[in-house]
Amino acid sequence: MPEPTKKEENEVPAPAPPPEEPSKEKEAGTTPAKDEEEVSPPSALPPGLGSRALERKDSDWTLVETPPGEEQAKQNANSQLSILFIEKPQGGTVKVGEDITFIAKVKAEDLLRKPTIKWFKGKWMDLASKAGKHLQLKETFERHSRVYTFEMQIIKAKDNFAGNYRCEVTYKDKFDSCSFDLEVHESTGTTPNIDIRSAFKRSGEGQEDAGELDFSGLLKRREVKQQEEEPQVDVWELLKNAKPSEYEKIAFQYGITDLRGMLKRLKRMRREEKKSAAFAKILDPAYQVDKGGRVRFVVELADPKLEVKWYKNGQEIRPSTKYIFEHKGCQRILFINNCQMTDDSEYYVTAGDEKCSTELFVREPPIMVTKQLEDTTAYCGERVELECEVSEDDANVKWFKNGEEIIPGPKSRYRIRVEGKKHILIIEGATKADAAEYSVMTTGGQSSAKLSVDLKPLKILTPLTDQTVNLGKEICLKCEISENIPGKWTKNGLPVQESDRLKVVHKGRIHKLVIANALTEDEGDYVFAPDAYNVTLPAKVHVIDPPKIILDGLDADNTVTVIAGNKLRLEIPISGEPPPKTMWSRGDKAIMEGSGRIRTESYPDSSTLVIDIAERDDSGVYHINLKNEAGEAHASIKVKVVDFPDPPVAPTVTEVGDDWCIMNWEPPAYDGGSPILGYFIERKKKQSSRWMRLNFDLCKETTFEPKKMIEGVAYEVRIFAVNAIGISKPSMPSRPFVPLAVTSPPTLLTVDSVTDTTVTMRWRPPDHIGAAGLDGYVLEYCFEGTEDWIVANKDLIDKTKFTITGLPTDAKIFVRVKAVNAAGASEPKYYSQPILVKEIIEPPKIRIPRHLKQTYIRRVGEAVNLVIPFQGKPRPELTWKKDGAEIDKNQINIRNSETDTIIFIRKAERSHSGKYDLQVKVDKFVETASIDIQIIDRPGPPQIVKIEDVWGENVALTWTPPKDDGNAAITGYTIQKADKKSMEWFTVIEHYHRTSATITELVIGNEYYFRVFSENMCGLSEDATMTKESAVIARDGKIYKNPVYEDFDFSEAPMFTQPLVNTYAIAGYNATPNCSVRGNPKPKITWMKNKVAIVDDPRYRMFSNQGVCTLEIRKPSPYDGGTYCCKAVNDLGTVEIECKLEVKVIAQ
């Protein structure tokens, strides 16, 4: 029985509800029905349904009517406190089979996202999961008005779609809901031939609805007979008095679908009712009425003046044709006509501030079995149908077999078909196990019948037949019987086991045993025995195999090769059933079994041909013949006797080079019966007897090129032929020959200089000259547009430079050079393009060596010899200056040539230090460069050394730096001590950087002198400065007070100690500009090119070691030229230094 429809906690309650009503409603609304998960309501609802709610009853939907007054009060209450809705769905009425649509609208001005909406039927049924054929849910959004529109469309409405519906909308902490009803009326159509006038009656005398027709009278009048046959049963009383274990049985018997809701009401009704001051007599705890019946609620008031209101599920009931109110003295009576399942609910009445409540249970009429089951007899394998009829369409019916319930399913042999009031149990392929007593049970009765299953008489339609099958073919034993029953196969009395090769097939009445690829062991007696019958079908299978000769181990042309002198034992596998007879022959002569040199041997599965000590005459075709009752087989086998090949003819040397030659030869006259696979070649010096093999892989051709010979030495060569049997004897040696060849062409032919009448060419010797040596070169030229080469030198020249004279100005010539030796002239080396005979001005360029781009340092007395190459044509003018003044040539020697200039100082002095400027001038073009030369010497000694303090075993010394630092920075000091007694000096501290020091661990009682040496990169000063006074280490102890020193601040802003210098690089060779920097904290180094930082570029590598910063540019190209900058940054400052890099490309 469905649970009554109630309001949720957040819905607007009816006027003047009792205090405990909300909690009661909450309790009833939060517990789902017992079989909630089993319900399958329609997938869609009819559109336009109004004023009703959907309640579930098993798998049906039940009509629930709501009075118009109640609906209006509910809507008025909802409209007063509506939070989100701007338009609520309204109740409606629809006919069966028609459509209806409900619309709800929500204003979205204050909403940041779409609200959540849910449609319910009754209290718990969420319709979102039921959308489909009969129900569609839609939602739209109007951007201009910012309104969400939600629609629920019910398609082709049914009777059970009627009831109460609810729409809920939620947004964050806001919630709003609205209930509405749907009424579904029967569509007008033909009705049974009944006296309608006598059945109808007028109802509601003296009420507002007086004169309207009451259809419930007709319904009651038609149900009188059924009610008279069966006494009225109060299910409510049965449940109150029954044990909990019997609840489900009672629910099925009396058609209760909402057992869980009914038990919940029972629990509430058992509570004790408090005595009431307003009511003299309250409502009964529960009322029961049949569907379509009429119920009467009566209360008696203590004060007849009190106003009484009736409620259903918290909604006030208004008078109508369905709800009729009567007043009889202190009694207040409510009649409910034509009770439906939707009226199954909680009712209460209020009088003043008090109320009393009751539960109304609407019971459906019991389902009766109108047509009983009949006893049935069937044969095995037939389809059996057990049929009965009940009083209602699509009623809930249960089937039983021998008292156990039959539950149909995908794996069950039982199927249940329902056709209106007919219920049919179907058994496919009945067996003897299906013989039993079957029964059907409804809520109002039951019926049973017996089913008997017997075997049909068996007939053999097609028996098994004996078969003779060739080996490897398919065996198929087939029989057909009159019944579709399984059976068993046996072979020689043993059961047949299925495998990949053996298959047992059963299709209807046909049984097959199929054996693929028959074997000899498949032969035997086979029997098929049908199950449940004492019948057997025998058959014999005989497997035969024609003789076969298996030549898989031979070549494609069945050739067998044997080496002369060896024994041949040729074993040929054979098969056949029964075993065949074998015969060998050669030509017309048969080969018999015996002890001869050529004989045969026979075995069950093979035949063997034996030839002892094979000879060349044994080559030929041998025949083998097989024969048995299944057929014959023939094969031919070719026997080939092979030997070593004959030696080839002596080879001929056709061409000779510097360390190679080309030799040819003819194949041997006899190849030994096997194709020649290749040749081995050997050579030796003519005066030697030791042959050396030249190839370890066979030479497939009849020509070969020996290499790596010594020029001028006579050689001989010979050949070996090789086949599959082995190597032949060597051929006769060739005639002696001597390797000798010309040189390779000269290399790197370039233009050295060009004037208006001459062209000077340079080249390099050939890469390979050879044993014949090099006698000289021949230089040739020809004018552009001609092919006449003119020899420039009449006699051979041994130099790699030559000037061609007597050329006309503005002419273009091509030039080539050849190397000549005893073997002749080499291939010429050509200059790649024509040369214009005209002097060309080449701007000057100075090529400062890399080591001169930084300060050039030498010690006093050392020699200075600097070579600075330059370019420029014609011969440029050179000018040297030192510190802007002319150079004294008496002290500094300057030597100039066409390609470089040299500064030479025999013994350097400190006065030679300075900046040397070089200027190269060609016509109006000028190029300058500078070189810094620093001549250094040992420094002088410190000026003054003082003893500042003596305490304990310690002496504090201070001194002043030397006046003469030797033209180099002072790198440190060396301090020595001497005992006054011995005056032997010992070094205490070396490479000390400060000008004050503390000498410790002196001997008490001794008197010491101290001296200090200065040190630069040349070494220690020649003299040292000694303290004038001595320091006496007193024996008596003194109290020493440690002087207080302030912490020295080592922090320093970045400073470059060695700058970057402008650099020239050759394309393809790495360039490494570097500089040195110091600073504390350690500065961060960043390299930049053209003011752009170099980051993660694989063409650059950056190093920093002990303050020396290096940027390595890998294989630079002209694109890499530009301004490079090194930037050092720490907390105290930033410093940058730049240099220019120019990348030169050397013409090839």
Image (spheres, rainbow, N blue to C red):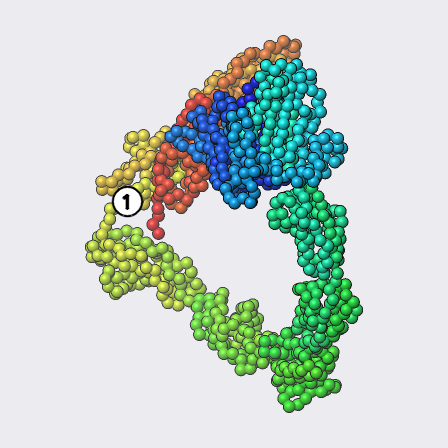
Read off the residue under disc 1: 872
Asked whether, in this view, residue 776 is left or right of residue 515, the answer is: left
Residue 282 lies in quadrant: top right
Q: Nearer the viewer, residue 725 or 14?
A: 14
Where is 274 relative to 660, above or below?
A: above
Question: Residue placed at 74% from the left, 62% from the top?
Answer: 455
Where in the figure is residue 302, as x and y percent of width and height? 64, 15
Q: Nearer the viewer, residue 276 or 901?
A: 276
Question: Residue placed at 34% from the left, 56% from the top?
Answer: 749
Asked whether, in this view, residue 1094 is left or right of residue 9, the answer is: left
Residue 216 lies in quadrant: top right
Where in the figure is residue 675, as x and y percent of width and height? 55, 77
Question: Residue placed at 62% from the left, 14% from the top?
Answer: 303
Where in the figure is residue 613, as x and y percent of width and height? 68, 82
Crowding near pointer 1: few (<14 within 10 Å), some, many (20+)?
many
Q: Is residue 1067 visible?
A: yes
